[in-house]
Structures are given as structure tokens and as C-alpha cells.
Image: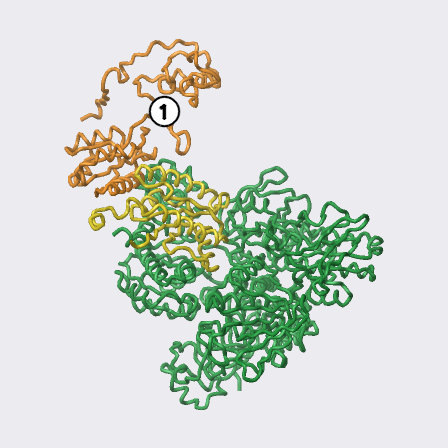
């Protein structure tokens, strides 16, 4: 899932300052699950924006709506009417959703969230990064633990010299990914895998090659 | 000539007396699906309590609290109530009694009577009941909410029968009606016929017969009552002026003080007087001086000591320790003179009062005594039935039980407890009668119509007089969707009023209802039943709490109170308009019971349940059964506690329906009434049991405060240890010269503000036991108030007669205890001699009482989700009316886990709790309220947050359509959250956390909460 | 100027605080009439949205009153509510509303006195803070003021 966090209210107030009618648009997918931009958060932000605006002596009208998925044009199309009545749109989707809206509508679209990473849920209320979207997955040889997303230095062949007691030297509350990989391979009885040298990574499949695209010939129209 | 009907069916319990105790006993039986006939000689049920204005310690209006019980609907046909009926003869024996009943004519056809009051208007002398203050008139409606609802005519006082017949617009008056005799068979009988109050007319020195301003406490109560002779105005009977100074004189007719007085203490009068004094100041005039002349302030009930403190400190009730010997009114003087003497100053003091209230005690009623004699029940000389020393509700005749004041003076909680206990024993003798179920699930309308709201403002007279109910109605009428609004004065809900509410609402075609009155915690269920009868879904109702949360807290600010009442009404209206019809959930009942605590209380409760067919799990944390009673030898009456304990333990361990788990603790718990699951740690091993009800009988802890050398000097011990010494070390006891007992050690102080109740009788018990072995010993009992309530008073008198020296001490001058060689010197101040006295004691017995087992209670309360009192005892649902029920349905409390008390009282509570538990276990199914959360599957993002936050692990993301018991076979249902209504506890945490706003909690939907906020803040920001 | 009478919305859980409020009534313990009670089954039901909305609609203060910690009828609804109250306080600070206008309290059903005292204390606290900064500043009132 794509994780995100709400931007500071002050920044959002700056965006919407010139506008009187705002469409505050949530998304019922990833950002709902990570409690950043679902119906509930839309409601909270709407209240907060209204109060903050009122405090500065200004009245702002906010229309709340939450789409099934803001990164699909068909869903985005559903809000044409609402966008038409609004002066600006504040999107509570991830960056994909914001752009989908911006591409479709001529109105100003502002992000309410900072999109953070692709991650998983550790437990209620805690998410951590699991995938960097490098385009060439190594998990098959690293015991199911990604050294790209979870090692601060993206090392491909074992930990750096700073790894101590299983903890990353850069962020001490993060476990060393290579330590985890070793433990996991040990548990699986596949420590020989660790001895295999992983060649230098070709970053072309990652963002290094510019914006990426997937085309499924059989599906694409 | 009389109508004769043939014999009725067997398998029935006959309850004689329709006061509070009789009603409770009958309802318990009916709820446990036993057939019961309730007879009362009065035209309507309610008894003494229905005449009280308010009851301690909550100071509620009694009409409101008794009314729900007397409503006749919804008892599944198990309850047959008959007013104006007396029992003329009884024959047969346990299991097969035959009772002859005689029903006097009411002269009014109840079916036809609409209670229009026309007969009352045409006979203007007709008034409501007010004993001794007003003449009875031919048409007497006893109190405004009499059940069954009909006027009754005293035909002997009617001069023109034809005129009376004709005055009725519906022809309901039948002057020629005849009495009806019939015989009923019953398996057991509960006598709940109450008691009379002492008549002080012959005590000329109190001036009751001669002075109109001298009244009894019940007459004063009626004067305080909104439905009383003065319409709720407190006025001196002599001149109609409000009194400025009112005095109460305690123990009139009790404690053997006056001619004809009983030897026992009537137990309830101290609290009664305190309540009247508080109510006088609180409701009528803060300036009225209230003085209570007392001998011992006997506030021994649960939390009653705090009530006494409140009376003194918050309400300024003056307490004078004195026995006035004269109440005079000299010629030409407008006031009454009370003459008395104080302990420390032996001279006459004359004080003037405007009114004097005599706190008259209970005494046996002659008719009831005759019936008891006819039944062959053994009686005390004073006419009260003798009961077993371990079973206060069992008479000497098997199958005949007693409860309430017929067993001796007592207050309402004790009466309710005895009533349930009697119903447990009496019900054990008769089988369940299968009948269709009583409580119907909510009616689901086919279509939801536009809201048509009926608004009812139900006020309790003076109780809520700060609210202008008429203005409130006018306000309601202007609100959209309101089709009718009305005030129902001095009423909030007996069958009567409910009937008229129903017709009013139905006439206007209401489909939703708002009640403005007392807290929904008390009244909601009753009004929901009413909606059910009207064919309306029972969740289309809202209650505006304008009594507890407006009138009673903002009484001093009429403007704010009225504005707030309007606002609360608007909130309720907004809520009811936003409400949706909801369906109840019906679950099958598990018929097992869990009893926690293996003391005498727990074992008794377990045995009663097991004898009536329930499978009982008895859980005890220690290695053996018996609890604190293992330290006891005998009761004050001479009952052998060790034999009792041995008998109970043997029966319990051998009973085929009881499984005993020792060394066992409760570790987890889930479910709801009828279907609980509890995890036990049985000697370290986990075991899960299923049960439908639970009884907590975990006891209390003997207090061991650090005071008076306790634990430091071997000659100082508590009363429990003293009892052991007396029974086991006789040679030592025989050598004693002086024994001192000190009362209230570690009770009634800052650390433990409550009275431990049992210490006064236990010190007297020990004093009598010591004297028996060593008649020459001098025993000093240093006390604050000697609380030998009920028949314990007779033992107190006996101890005095035998020479025990009772000395009152004050908390600002407590006794001093110091070691002096082989003895212990106790120094106290004698008020009469006015100097200090030193006693060289061989033994000092401290009455240390009990404290709550705070830590273990807290642990259990946490696992079960139950409330505790401030002192750490388990809190019952309602101190007056539900003394053994707990806030969580299906849970009951008994014994010292509730509050300290003596052994027979614990056993009575055990039986009462068993009776209440049977009301759950006897039903095959239970209707679960629609207070569960539900998921909008179109919105659900299957994020798992609800699954993770639910404290009871209820929500699931559906993976297939198999075995989930839900109709989520459509595509949208799969892979979405599902909350099982049978398991959901209705806390709403999932609804609050759901990021997709896909979950709503029934009755508390966001739309309703936001509508409430809209109304609450409507005028604030506009 | 008329004396400022704070309006406080009190979300009270059915089992403890609401019952405590009833108890306060039966003990005739008065507290300021500006404290308005909204009954909820458990404070765990109180959504951050309800708290913000109360301020948005003009409350000067909001009280979330539940059971004492460990006493929750639903295990830990009060603990969850306390976390939500902290979360909402941060939101309030961002908006520019003093965080102390929002308060969580715990009491048992029998503590009528505590309820009355808590209600009085929060009212006095808010009185000292003055009216909510987001109240009376919208267009219709703002012009009048």
C-alpha cells in the first residue's frame, strides 16, 4: 500500500487562501487504510480548515467527498459536477490521485498529504517502508526481505561496517536489513544463498530511467 | 350471595401482599417462568412504599421508582394480580396448599373505566390517600398511579347509589357488584403482607392525639409528597403556615421505650428521619431548622453512613443525642415545646418547635397475625413470625416464606433482597409453567414513514418544579415533525399513565416518541415496551434527561434550567428524527451459572441454583471452601456456624449439578447475559466455561487497622479472634476481671467512612458469651452509636440487664489504650461523671469490622467489566430497588462482596442472587438489544482497523460465504468487514476508528451525534 | 459586557460518567448549566470528528468523560479515547485553538461529586481562557462584533 501523512495545516491554508469554495477529496484505497485520506480524515480536515479560516476572519466553504480510487480516470470523472462548483480542489489521495485530478480538471488541485512510501502495516497505527519500486525484485534471493527499501545504504551484499547488534547505524530504531536477511536465511536453512554475490544493480528499471510505464498488450486498448 | 368459581390449576406460588416485597417476589417468579398469584387487600398494589414521597439514599421520587414494577404488561401471563382480595383460609401442606380467596367488589368495571375522574369531580369531597390527615371519601384513588388503574368506591359511605351510577359517562360504576370467593391451589406461599406502624395516640406526653402539629413520620412524608393532602406544600396542620423549626423524635414504639412499644429496633427509622430532614431543607426552605432527637444513629446500611455525614455537613441537619420526655403546648403559645436532657448537662432543656415528627416503628398487623396463626406459623410474643437463624425468610411451616416488614422492620433494599430470596425458595417448590415468551423483539416496520413525533413531558411534581413544563410543551409544539406534545404531571410511568400516554400518542398517529423526564438509565425500557404495544419500533424513542441532568442540578437557576431543558428536548427531537428502526437479536440461553467465591454465600447460592436444575461452576481462589465463616463459631442467636459450614461444604461438593474449582481464578471473560464465556486458571491450567449468569460472592476482608495496640499486644484482639478465645481458652476467660470492647475501630473514619454493620452485635455476642463463662467479669463496651438493629436490640437489652457497661465516646475524645505490665489500660471519658476512667483490662476486643477486598475486587471488576463503589465493594445496579443486580445484565452480587453484613443476611442475599439469576437462566432465549455496530460494505475498505481495535475480537473480514451466519453472499459483502450482532458489545470503538466511516453504531450513529451537537450549540454560533 | 458563560460539550460514557452525572443530580450537586452532556455508550465511541465538530459549532470547551482507567465496561475504550483526545489536541493547536480547551476525565459511576467538580473546574478554566477563538468570527457574527 502507498502510505501518506497529512501536511501541516498552515501549508494547506496557504494553498487555499485565495479560494472560497473548496472540494476536499478523499480516496477509499491506500490512504484510507493508512488513516491519512479516507472519509474520516476528510471530515477532520474539513472541520479544521473551516475553523482555522474562520479564526483568521475568513469564511471558506468546504465540500467533502471521497472517491473509491483517485488514481483511476473513471472514478475521477464521477466528481466532475462537484469540481465544477468548486474554486479549487484539495486532494487527500497520494500523489497519483492528486495528479489524476490535476490532469482531468482545469481547476487548481492541491495535495493535502505528503505521500511517503510503499509499506506494510506492522500493527495498528504503525506502517513501515517495504518496497522501493526498483523494478527488478531481489526478494527471491534475500530471504523475502528487501535490502533496497530497508537498508539505508541500499547495500546488495551484506551489511555495512556500522551494523551492530542487529541495528542500523543510521537510524537506531530500525533493524539492519541484512541482519534480518541473515536470520531469515538461517531459519530457512539457506545460508548458502548469502554467499552468492549479487551483481551491481541496474537502476534503469528504477526511477533512474525516468518515469516508467507498464503496458499490458492484451489488455491495453 | 357469592359467585363461586371452580378450582384453579396447581403449580403456583401464592404471594400475599402487594407491597414492594410482594411485587418483587411475584415478578422474580414470573420472570423465572413460574406461575404466581399476587393478592392484596387494597384496591391497588404498591403498599407502604407507594405512599412515600422519596426514598433514601438517592432521594428519588418513589412513585417513579415503584411504577415500573407495577406495570402489568409484559410478564408473559405468569403473573395474576388481584386487588381487594384477602386470604380467608389455607389448608394443606408444602407442595399442595389450598387457599380460599375473597375478592371484594370494586363497584367499578375496570375494563370500562377510562379514569376520566368524573365520579371524583361529582363527589368533590373525594381525595387521595392521606392517613390520619384527611377523612376518607367514598371514591378513593389511593395514590395517583395506582395499579390496576381504576377508582374504587366505598359503597358504605355513598348515600345515593343511582346518582353515583349515572355520573359515569361510560357506565363503569356497578353499585350492585358482589364479592367473589374462590379457591386456589399452590405449592408454596410467600407472606409479604407488610406491617403496621406504631400508633402513638396513647402516649399523651408526646401530644400526638391532642396537637395537630405532632405527626408521625409517615404523615409527614405524605405532607412532603406532591400527591399528598397539601399538594406538596409543607404547612403546619394547626395554622396552615410553613414551619420554621421541625423536630424528629426517634424510637417511638421501638426499642421498648414507651408503653406498648416493641422491644426490637425498627431498623429503618433513622434513615427515614434523616431523609425527611434533608428533603425538608432541600426542597422547601433552606431556612427550616431540622433537629433529630435520637438514641443511636443507626445508619448501618451500605453507604448509609455517608448519607448521615451529608445530612450533617451538607444539609445542616442538627442531631441531638437525647430522649425528649415531653412535647407540650402551653395555653396561648403557638409553638410546641420539646423538653429533654443532655448526657453531659443533667438539666431540663426546653426548646420550641413548629412541628414535631414522631419516628414511629413497625408493629405486627392483627389480620396478618391471624393468617400466620391459621397457617400454623410460630410467632414471637410481638406477633412477628419466627424464622430460621440461617434462613430469615423461612418460617416454621415448610413451604411458607416471609419477606419484607412482615419479618421485622426493615428498609426497602432489605425487603427487596428478602423478596427475591423468598421467591427463590418458594419457586423451588413449583415447576416452570411453559408459556409463550414475554418480551417480544422489536417490531420492524415495512416502510419508514415521515417522522411524526409525540413529545411527552413527564414531571414529578415538586421534584422538578423548576422546569416550566407547559412552556416546554409549547416550545416542542413549534418544532417541525412534532404532531403532539403534552405534560403528564406527577407521573412517569406506571401502567395507568402508560395507558393514557399510549392513547394520546396513538390518537395523533405518532410514529416516534420523545420523553422529557428522568434519566434514560431508569425509564427507557419501560417506554420502549410501550412503543412495542403501539406497533412502533422500540428504537424510535429518545429520552431527554431533564430531571437528573437539568432540574436537579440547576434548580437554583430557573432561567438557565428552562433554557437547558428546551435544548435537551431539541436534542432528543433531532436524535429521534435521525433514528432508524432497528431489529433486535435473539440468542439462545446457556443454562449454566458461574458462582465466584466459595464462602457460605457462594455455596448457598450455588446450592439453590443447582437444586433448581442449573449446572453450577463454583470458583474459589483458596484451597478450600468456607471463606471468612471458617473463623466463626456461633451466631448471636446461637446458630452453629461450624455445623452450617460443614453441611454446606458437603452438600456443595457432592451435588451432581455443582462443579467446584478450588485454587482457581477468573482470567478472562466475554459475552453477554445468557451467553457468557469465562476463562479460569484452575491451579494454573486454563479452562474455559460457558454460562448464562454469574453471581459474585467473593466476600470481604476482616479489617486489621493499626490502632489501639492491635497486633502489638497479645491482650488486644479483634472480635473474630475474641470469639475464638472465648470458645477455645475457657480457663483463661474464667480468670478475667475486666474486658473492654471498643467499637468503630477502623470504621466510620476518614479511611473507611462506612459502618461495618456487624460489629455492634458481634461485640454483644462476645460479651454475652464471656458472661456465660465468667459471670463476675466486668465488661465495658465503648461505642459511638450502638447499632443493634432489628432483634439484635433484644440482645443489647439483655447485655445491659446482665451488667455490661455501655459508654458512649466521641471521635474528638477517643479512648486511649496502653500496655501496663500484664494488663492493658484503657482510658475513656465518662460523660455523666464528667471525668476520665481507667480500666485495667485482661482483654481488649476491638470491633474492627470489614473492608472491601479491594485488590481482588478490582481485578475481578476489570475482567468482568463491573463497577465498584468508592470503597471497593461491588456496586449494585440500584441501591434501593435492585440490591443484588449489577449494571451488567446477567451479573449478580451477594454477601460481603456487596457490603459487610451478618451471616444470615449474607445467606438471604445469596438466595436473592440465585433467584435473580434464575430469571435469566429460566428463559430459553434472550432478546438482545439492537445496540450493535454494523458495516456499510460499500464503504468498507477492508483495512482491518475494526478487527484490530475491537476489545472483544468481533469484526471479521469475510473470506467466504460459509459459516459466518451473515447474508453477505453478494460480491460486495465478501472481503469486507462483518460484525456479528450476537457478539458485538456495542461500545462503538470500531465506529470511531473506522477510517472509511463505514461502521455505524446503532442508536449512536454519527448523524445522531452531529444532530445533537447541532442542537446543543444551535444558538451559540449564529 | 455581559459575563462570558462558557459552553462545554461533555461526551459522557453511559456506564460511568453519564451515571456519575445522574448521581450528581440525585445528590443535588449543582454545576454550571453551560455544561451540556452527550451520552455515548463508551468514550471509545467518541470520534475525533465529534470533538472537532463541537468546536466548529461553537463550543468553548469539550470534555470527554469516561470511566477510570481499568474500569472501562468495554476493557479499554477510555484509554483509546484518551489517545484520540491527544491526537485531537494537536489538531486544535494547528488550528490555533488552545489544546487545554479539550480535556479527558475519568470517574466512576458513584462519583457524582467528581462529575460536578470536573464540570465546574473545566468551566472555570475555559472562563479564564475566554471564548473559543473560532467562535463568533464567521461572517454573520464577525460583522456584528
Determine whether B684 is above or below B458 in the image: above
Q: Is residue C30 left or right of residue B185?
A: left
Label 1 Cα crowd, 10 Å radius (few <14 / some 14-19 / many 20+): some
The chain shown in yellow is which? C
The chain shown in green is which? B
The answer to whether residue B69 shows anywhere in this view is no
Q: Is residue B415 left or right of residue B474?
A: right
Label 1 sits on residue: A129
For the residue pair B189 and A56, the one nearer the viewer reads as A56
For the residue pair B372 and C12, the one nearer the viewer reads as C12
Residue B298 position in % (x across, y down): 62, 63
Tell me where residue B807 sits by quadrant: bottom right
> Chain A is which colour?
orange
The residue shown at (29%, 56%) is: B448
Residue B677 position in % (x across, y down): 52, 45
Q: Is residue B950 left or right of residue B203?
A: left
Amino acid at each position: 500500500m502507498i502510505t501518506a501523512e497529512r501536511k501541516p495545516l498552515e501549508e494547506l491554508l496557504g494553498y487555499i487562501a485565495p479560494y472560497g469554495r473548496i472540494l476536499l477529496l478523499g480516496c477509499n484505497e491506500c490512504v484510507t487504510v493508512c488513516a491519512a485520506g479516507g472519509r474520516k480524515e476528510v471530515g477532520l480536515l474539513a472541520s479544521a480548515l473551516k475553523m482555522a479560516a474562520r479564526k483568521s476572519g475568513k469564511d471558506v466553504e468546504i465540500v467533502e467527498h471521497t472517491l473509491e480510487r483517485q488514481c483511476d480516470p473513471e472514478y475521477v470523472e464521477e466528481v466532475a459536477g462537484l469540481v465544477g462548483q468548486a474554486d479549487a480542489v484539495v486532494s487527500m489521495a497520494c500523489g497519483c490521485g492528486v495528479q489524476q485530478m490535476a490532469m482531468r480538471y482545469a481547476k487548481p488541485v492541491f495535495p493535502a498529504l505528503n505521500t511517503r512510501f510503499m509499506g506494510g502495516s506492522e500493527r495498528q497505527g504503525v506502517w513501515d517502508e517495504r518496497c522501493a519500486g526498483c523494478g527488478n525484485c531481489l526478494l527471491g534471493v534475500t530471504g523475502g526481505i528487501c535490502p533496497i527499501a530497508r537498508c539505508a545504504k541500499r547495500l546488495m551484499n551484506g551489511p555495512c561496517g556500522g551494523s551492530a547488534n542487529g541495528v542500523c547505524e543510521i537510524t537506531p530504531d530500525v533493524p539492519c536489513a541484512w541482519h534480518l536477511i541473515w536470520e531469515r536465511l538461517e531459519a530457512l536453512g539457506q545460508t548458502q544463498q548469502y554467499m552468492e554475490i549479487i551483481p551491481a544493480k541496474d537502476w534503469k528499471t528504477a526511477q533512474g530511467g525516468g518515469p516508467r510505464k507498464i503496458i499490458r498488450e492484451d489488455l491495453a486498448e | 350471595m357469592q359467585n363461586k368459581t371452580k378450582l384453579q390449576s396447581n403449580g403456583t406460588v401464592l404471594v400475599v401482599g402487594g407491597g414492594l416485597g410482594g411485587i418483587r417476589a411475584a415478578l422474580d417468579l414470573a420472570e423465572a417462568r413460574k406461575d404466581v398469584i399476587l393478592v392484596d387487600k387494597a384496591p391497588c398494589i404498591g403498599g407502604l412504599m407507594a405512599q412515600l414521597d422519596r426514598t433514601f439514599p438517592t432521594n428519588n421520587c418513589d412513585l417513579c421508582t415503584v411504577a415500573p414494577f407495577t406495570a402489568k404488561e409484559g410478564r408473559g401471563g405468569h403473573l395474576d394480580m388481584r386487588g381487594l382480595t384477602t386470604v380467608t383460609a389455607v389448608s394443606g401442606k408444602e407442595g399442595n396448599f389450598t387457599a380460599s380467596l375473597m375478592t371484594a367488589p370494586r363497584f367499578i368495571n375496570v375494563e370500562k373505566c377510562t379514569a376520566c375522574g368524573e365520579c371524583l369531580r361529582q363527589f368533590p369531597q373525594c381525595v387521595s390517600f392521606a392517613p390520619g390527615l384527611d377523612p376518607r371519601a367514598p371514591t378513593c384513588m389511593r395514590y395517583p398511579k395506582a395499579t390496576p388503574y381504576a377508582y374504587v368506591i366505598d359503597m358504605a359511605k355513598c348515600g345515593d347509589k343511582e346518582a353515583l351510577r349515572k355520573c359515569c359517562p361510560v357506565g363503569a360504576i356497578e353499585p350492585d357488584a358482589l364479592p367473589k370467593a374462590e379457591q386456589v391451589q399452590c405449592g408454596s406461599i410467600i407472606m409479604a403482607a407488610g406491617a403496621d406502624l406504631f400508633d402513638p395516640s396513647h402516649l399523651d406526653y408526646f401530644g400526638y392525639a391532642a396537637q395537630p402539629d405532632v405527626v408521625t413520620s409517615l404523615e409527614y412524608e405524605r405532607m412532603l409528597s406532591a400527591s399528598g393532602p397539601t399538594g406538596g406544600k409543607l404547612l403546619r396542620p394547626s395554622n396552615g403556615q410553613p414551619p420554621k423549626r421541625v423536630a424528629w423524635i426517634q424510637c417511638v414504639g421501638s426499642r421498648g421505650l414507651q408503653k406498648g412499644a416493641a422491644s426490637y429496633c425498627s431498623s429503618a427509622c433513622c434513615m427515614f428521619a434523616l431523609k425527611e430532614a434533608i428533603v425538608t431543607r432541600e426542597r422547601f426552605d433552606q431556612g427550616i431548622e431540622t433537629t433529630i432527637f435520637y438514641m443511636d444513629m443507626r445508619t448501618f446500611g451500605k453507604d448509609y453512613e455517608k448519607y448521615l455525614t451529608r445530612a450533617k455537613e451538607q444539609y445542616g441537619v442538627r442531631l441531638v443525642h437525647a430522649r425528649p420526655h415531653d412535647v407540650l403546648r402551653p395555653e396561648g403559645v403557638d409553638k410546641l415545646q420539646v423538653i429533654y436532657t443532655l448526657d453531659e448537662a443533667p438539666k431540663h432543656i426546653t426548646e420550641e418547635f413548629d412541628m414535631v415528627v414522631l419516628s414511629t416503628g413497625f408493629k405486627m398487623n392483627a389480620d396478618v397475625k391471624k393468617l400466620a396463626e391459621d397457617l400454623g406459623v410460630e410467632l414471637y410474643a410481638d406477633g412477628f413470625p419466627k424464622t430460621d437463624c440461617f434462613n430469615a425468610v423461612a418460617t416454621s411451616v415448610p413451604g411458607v416464606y416471609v419477606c419484607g416488614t412482615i419479618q421485622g422492620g426493615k428498609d426497602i433494599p432489605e425487603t427487596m433482597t428478602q423478596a427475591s430470596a423468598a421467591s427463590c425458595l418458594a419457586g423451588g417448590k413449583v415447576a416452570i409453567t411453559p408459556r409463550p415468551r414475554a418480551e417480544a423483539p422489536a417490531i420492524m416496520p415495512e416502510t419508514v414513514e415521515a417522522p411524526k413525533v409525540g413529545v411527552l413531558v413527564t414531571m414529578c411534581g415538586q421534584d422538578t418544579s423548576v422546569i416550566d413544563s407547559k412552556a416546554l410543551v409549547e416550545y416542542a409544539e413549534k418544532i417541525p415533525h412534532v404532531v403532539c406534545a403534552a405534560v403528564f404531571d406527577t407521573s412517569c410511568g406506571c401502567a395507568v399513565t402508560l395507558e393514557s400516554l399510549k392513547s394520546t400518542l396513538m390518537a395523533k398517529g405518532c410514529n416516534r416518541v420523545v420523553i422529557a423526564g428522568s434519566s434514560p438509565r431508569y425509564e427507557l425500557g419501560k417506554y420502549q415496551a410501550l412503543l412495542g404495544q403501539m406497533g412502533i419500533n422500540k428504537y424510535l424513542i429518545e429520552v431527554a434527561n431533564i430531571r437528573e441532568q437539568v432540574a436537579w442540578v440547576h434548580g437554583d437557576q430557573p432561567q438557565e434550567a428552562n433554557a437547558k431543558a428546551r435544548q435537551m428536548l431539541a436534542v432528543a427531537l433531532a436524535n429521534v428524527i435521525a433514528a432508524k428502526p432497528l431489529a433486535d437479536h435473539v440468542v439462545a440461553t446457556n443454562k449454566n451459572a458461574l458462582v465466584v467465591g466459595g464462602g457460605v454465600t457462594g455455596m448457598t447460592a450455588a446450592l439453590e441454583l443447582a437444586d433448581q436444575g442449573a449446572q453450577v461452576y463454583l470458583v474459589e481462589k483458596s484451597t478450600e471452601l468456607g471463606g471468612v465463616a471458617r473463623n466463626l463459631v456461633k451466631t448471636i442467636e446461637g446458630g452453629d456456624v461450624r455445623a452450617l459450614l460443614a453441611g454446606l461444604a458437603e452438600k456443595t461438593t457432592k451435588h451432581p449439578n455443582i462443579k467446584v474449582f478450588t485454587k482457581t481464578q477468573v482470567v478472562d471473560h466475554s459475552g453477554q447475559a445468557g451467553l457468557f464465556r469465562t476463562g479460569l486458571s484452575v491451579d494454573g491450567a486454563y479452562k474455559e466455561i460457558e454460562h448464562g449468569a454469574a453471581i459474585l460472592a467473593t466476600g470481604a476482608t476482616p479489617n486489621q487497622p493499626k490502632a489501639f495496640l492491635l497486633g502489638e499486644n497479645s491482650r488486644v484482639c479483634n472480635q473474630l479472634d475474641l470469639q475464638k478465645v472465648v470458645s477455645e481458652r475457657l480457663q483463661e476467660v474464667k480468670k478475667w476481671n475486666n474486658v473492654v470492647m471498643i467499637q468503630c475501630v477502623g470504621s466510620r473514619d476518614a479511611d473507611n467512612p462506612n459502618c461495618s454493620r456487624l460489629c455492634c452485635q458481634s461485640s454483644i455476642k462476645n460479651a454475652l458469651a464471656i458472661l456465660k463463662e465468667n459471670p463476675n467479669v466486668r465488661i465495658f463496651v465503648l461505642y459511638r452509636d450502638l447499632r443493634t438493629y432489628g432483634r439484635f436490640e433484644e440482645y443489647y437489652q439483655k447485655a445491659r440487664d446482665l451488667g455490661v457497661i455501655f459508654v458512649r465516646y466521641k471521635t474528638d475524645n477517643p479512648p486511649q489504650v496502653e500496655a501496663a505490665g500484664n494488663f492493658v489500660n484503657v482510658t475513656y471519658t465518662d460523660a455523666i461523671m464528667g471525668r476520665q476512667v481507667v480500666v485495667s483490662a485482661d482483654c481488649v476486643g476491638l470491633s474492627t469490622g470489614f473492608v472491601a477486598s479491594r485488590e481482588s475486587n478490582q481485578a475481578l471488576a476489570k475482567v468482568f467489566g463491573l463497577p465498584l463503589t468508592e470503597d471497593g465493594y461491588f456496586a449494585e445496579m440500584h441501591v434501593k430497588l435492585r440490591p443484588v443486580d449489577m449494571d451488567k445484565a446477567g451479573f449478580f452480587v451477594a454477601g460481603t462482596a456487596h457490603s459487610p453484613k451478618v451471616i444470615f443476611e449474607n445467606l438471604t442475599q445469596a438466595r436473592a442472587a440465585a433467584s435473580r439469576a434464575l430469571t435469566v437462566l429460566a428463559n430459553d432465549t434472550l432478546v438482545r438489544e439492537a445496540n450493535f455496530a454494523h458495516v456499510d460494505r460499500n464503504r468498507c475498505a477492508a483495512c482491518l482497523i475494526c478487527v484490530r481495535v475491537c476489545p472483544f475480537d468481533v469484526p471479521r473480514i469475510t473470506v467466504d460465504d460459509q459459516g459466518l451466519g451473515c447474508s453477505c453472499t453478494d460480491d460486495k459483502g465478501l472481503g469486507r468487514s462483518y460484525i456479528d450482532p450476537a457478539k458485538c458489545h456495542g461500545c462503538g470503538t470500531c465506529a470511531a476508528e473506522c477510517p472509511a466511516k463505514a461502521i455505524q453504531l446503532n442508536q449512536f450513529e454519527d448523524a445522531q451525534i452531529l444532530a445533537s451537537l447541532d442542537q446543543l450549540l444551535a444558538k451559540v454560533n449564529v | 459586557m455581559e459575563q462570558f458563560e462558557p459552553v462545554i460539550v461533555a461526551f459522557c460514557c453511559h456506564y460511568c460518567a453519564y451515571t456519575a452525572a445522574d448521581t450528581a443530580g440525585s445528590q443535588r450537586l449543582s454545576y454550571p448549566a453551560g455544561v451540556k452532556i452527550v451520552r455515548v455508550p463508551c468514550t471509545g465511541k467518541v470520534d475525533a470528528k465529534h470533538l472537532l465538530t463541537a468546536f466548529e459549532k461553537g463550543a468553548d470547551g469539550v470534555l470527554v468523560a469516561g470511566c477510570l482507567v481499568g474500569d472501562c465496561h468495554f476493557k479499554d475504550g477510555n484509554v483509546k479515547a484518551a489517545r484520540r483526545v491527544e491526537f485531537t489536541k494537536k489538531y486544535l493547536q494547528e488550528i490555533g485553538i488552545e489544546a487545554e480547551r479539550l480535556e479527558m476525565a475519568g470517574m466512576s459511576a458513584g462519583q457524582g461529586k467528581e462529575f460536578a467538580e470536573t464540570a465546574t473546574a473545566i468551566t472555570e478554566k475555559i472562563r479564564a481562557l475566554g471564548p473559543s477563538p473560532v467562535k463568533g468570527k464567521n461572517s454573520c457574527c464577525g460583522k456584528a462584533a
